[in-house]
Structures are given as structure tokens and as C-alpha cells.
């Protein structure tokens, strides 16, 4: 899933200071699971903004709604009336959701409440880690299911480097993923596979090649 | 103008603080009438939203009273409550109400005198801090009392 984190409250409060009636829009997908922008966080954001603004001479009216997915038109259609009512929309979804909201409601000011961090998962309560680098060409079959693109600080494809010390990375306080790949390959008896030199990666399939698209003609609906 | 009497909401766990309050009553212990108690099945029932809502609805202070650490009837409820109170403090600081207006206390059902003591402690603390920023205007007679959410 996409991992996101709430922006500092002060930053959000500053972005909405010129508005008197806002729609706070949550998303029921990834950001609900990473506890950043689900129904509960929408409630907290609305109450926090009201508490702040009640202290001044410009109280704020908050409309709250959480939809199934912000990254799909059909769910955004459901909030058309609410969106009309509000002066601006605070989207508590990932960057994708914010942009879909902005595109669906072109005359509305849209404010992002989260910083989108990575594609990953929850390894334990309250801890989310990056797992996928979205490089566009998966190599996990060569590395025992552990991704060096996303989890090696240097993204090297023929590791480990000289900075791997006692299973730890020299760059950041993380485990050396190449150390783990080595151990995993040993367990599954495929160690010799690591002797093969991995050629340079085609980064044009990643973000470096510009915005990407996936097209599936077979599921397109033609009127 | 009359002396400031705070409004304090106490979220009390049924297994400890609520029973301790009963005991305090049976022992004829006096504690300030500024405490409004809300019974909870466990302090782990507390939620940051509930705490914030209390302030929005006019409270000057809030406290959560749960069992002694290690003694939760549901094993970990009071530890969870402690973390949530810490989170509520952070949010209250962010929005300018002040995190010091919310506290967490731990006691057992047999600690009636301690219950009364906590009530006094909290009463004195909030009295010193003065009305919540939302109630300041009310205290000086400028605006109607803070009301519920929109």
C-alpha cells in the first residue's frame, strides 16, 4: 500500500487560514490502514481545526466525509454536493487522491493534508517500512524476494557493498538488504545465483523515463 | 466577577477509578464539585477524539484515570490510554489549548483517598492555568459558552 504521514498541523492550519468552510475528505484505502487519512483522522483534523479557529475571531465550519477511494471518479462523484458547499477541500489521501480530487473539481482549491512517503507495509503496530521502489521492472525473483532497489540505500544490484557491517548499512540505520539477500539465498540453496552479474538496470522504465502509463485494451469500454 | 470554577471531565475506568470514587464517597471524603465523571469500561476506551471533544464542548481540563500499570483488567488498556493521552497533549499544544490541561492517572479500586487527592490536584492545577482559551471570552462575559461540534 501507499504509506503517508500527516503534515505538521501548523502547516495545514496556515493553508486553510483564508477559508471559513472546508470539506475534509478522507480515503478508505491505504491511508486508512497507515492511520494517516481515514475516517478517524478526518474527525481529529476537523476537531483540531475547529478548536484552533474558535480561539480567534474567525471560527471555521468543517464538513467531514470519507470515501471508498479518492483515486477513482465514481467515488468522487458521490461528494459533488458536499464539494460545492465547501470553499476548499482538504484531501487526506495520498498524492494520487489529492490530484484526482483537484481534477474532478476543477473550480475548487484543494489542499493536501499528508506527505506521501513510500510504497510499503506495516511491519508491526505503528511502524511502516518501504518495500517497493516502483522501478517498473521487477527483479525480486533474482534476489530471494528482497528488493535492493527499494531497500538498499545505494540501490546497488550486485551487493553487498563494502559498507555492510554486521548486517547493518553504513548509510542509514537500517539492516543491509544485501546481507539479508545473501542469507535468504543460502537458506533456499540458490547462493550460486548471486554469482551472476546483474547488468545495468533500464531506469527508463522507472520514473526516470517520465510519467508512466499502463494500458489494457482488453478491459477498455468503447461507447 | 465570581471566582473561576473550572470544568473538569474525568474519564474513569470502571474497575479502578470509578470504584475508588464510590469508596471515596463511602468514606465521606470531600473533593471539588468541579469534576464531572464519565464511567468507562476500561481506560483503554479513551480516544484522542473524545478528549478533544470534551474541550470543544467547554471543558477546562480533562483527565483519564486507569488502573495501576500491570493491573489492567483487560491487560493493556491503561498502557494504551497513556499513549493516547500523550498524543492528545501534542494535539492540544498544536491547536493552542495547551497539553498540560490533560493528564493520565493510575490508581486501584481500593484507593478512595487517592481518588479524592487526584481530584484536588487536578482542580488546583486547572484553576491555576485559568479557563481554557475557548472559555476565556465566556469568563470575561464576551461570548456565549462553547458549544458542541458543528
Image: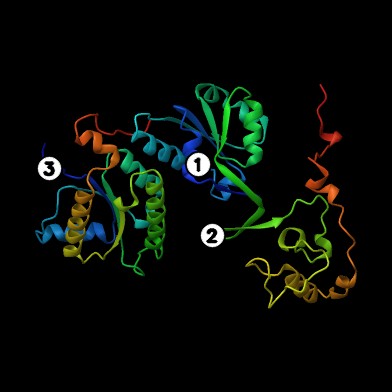
Location of residue B75 by image quarter: bottom left
x and y percent of residue B78 in the render? Answer: 37, 61
- Please name whichever residue, A30 or A208, is drawn nearer the observer in this view of the structure: A208
Vertical side of A176 occupied by B14: above or below: above
Q: Nearer the viewer, mark 1 or mark 3?
A: 1
Q: CA distance from mark 1 to mark 3?
A: 38 Å
Label at residue A125 = 2
Q: Nearer the viewer, mark 1 or mark 2?
A: 1
Q: Which residue is mark 1?
A: A11
Tags 2 and 3 touching, CB below 8 Å: no
Image quarter of the N terminus of chain B: top left
- Please name whichever residue, B3 or A32, is drawn nearer the observer in this view of the structure: B3
Of all residues, the one furthest to the left in this rendering is B28
Mark 1 or 2 closer to N-term?
Answer: 1
Q: Secondary structure at mark 2?
A: loop
Give the crowd class for mark 2: few <14, some 14-19, many >=20 residues within 10 Å. Answer: few
Amino acid at each position: 500500500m501507499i504509506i503517508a504521514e500527516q503534515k505538521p498541523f501548523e502547516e495545514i492550519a496556515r493553508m486553510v487560514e483564508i477559508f471559513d468552510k472546508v470539506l475534509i475528505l478522507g480515503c478508505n484505502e491505504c491511508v486508512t490502514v497507515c492511520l494517516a487519512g481515514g475516517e478517524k483522522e478526518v474527525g481529529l483534523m476537523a476537531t483540531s481545526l475547529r478548536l484552533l479557529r474558535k480561539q480567534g475571531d474567525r471560527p471555521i465550519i468543517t464538513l467531514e466525509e470519507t470515501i471508498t477511494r479518492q483515486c477513482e471518479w465514481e467515488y468522487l462523484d458521490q461528494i459533488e454536493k458536499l464539494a460545492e458547499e465547501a470553499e476548499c477541500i482538504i484531501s487526506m489521501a495520498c498524492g494520487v487522491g489529492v490530484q484526482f480530487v483537484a481534477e474532478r473539481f476543477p473550480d475548487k482549491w484543494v489542499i493536501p493534508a499528508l506527505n506521501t512517503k513510500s510504497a510499503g507495509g506495516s511491519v508491526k503496530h505503528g511502524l511502516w517500512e518501504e518495500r517497493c521502489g516502483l522501478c517498473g521492472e521487477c527483479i525480486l525473483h533474482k534476489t530471494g524476494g528482497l528488493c535492493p532497489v527499494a531497500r538498499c540505500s545505494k540501490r546497488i544490484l550486485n551487493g553487498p557493498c563494502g559498507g555492510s557491517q554486521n548486517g547493518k548499512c553504513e548509510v542509514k540505520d537500517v539492516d543491509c538488504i544485501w546481507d539479508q539477500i545473501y542469507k535468504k539465498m543460502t537458506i533456499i540453496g540458490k547462493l550460486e545465483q548471486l554469482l551472476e552479474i546483474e547488468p545495468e538496470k533500464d531506469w527508463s522504465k522507472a520514473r526516470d523515463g517520465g510519467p508512466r502509463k499502463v494500458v489494457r485494451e482488453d478491459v477498455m469500454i468503447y461507447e | 466577577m465570581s471566582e473561576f470554577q473550572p470544568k473538569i471531565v474525568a474519564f474513569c475506568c470502571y474497575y479502578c477509578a470509578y470504584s475508588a470514587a464510590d469508596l471515596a464517597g463511602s468514606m465521606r471524603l470531600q473533593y471539588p464539585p468541579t469534576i464531572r465523571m464519565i464511567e468507562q469500561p476500561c481506560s483503554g476506551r479513551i480516544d484522542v477524539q473524545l478528549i478533544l471533544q470534551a474541550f470543544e464542548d467547554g471543558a477546562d481540563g480533562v483527565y483519564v484515570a486507569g488502573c495501576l500499570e500491570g493491573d489492567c483488567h483487560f491487560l493493556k488498556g491503561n498502557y494504551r490510554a497513556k499513549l493516547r493521552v500523550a498524543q492528545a497533549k501534542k494535539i492540544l499544544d498544536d491547536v493552542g489549548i495547551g497539553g498540560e490541561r490533560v493528564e493520565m492517572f493510575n490508581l486501584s479500586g481500593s484507593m478512595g483517598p487517592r481518588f479524592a487527592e487526584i481530584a484536588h490536584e487536578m482542580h488546583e492545577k486547572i484553576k491555576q492555568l485559568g479557563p481554557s482559551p475557548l472559555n476565556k471570552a465566556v469568563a470575561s462575559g464576551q461570548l456565549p459558552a462553547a458549544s458542541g461540534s458543528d
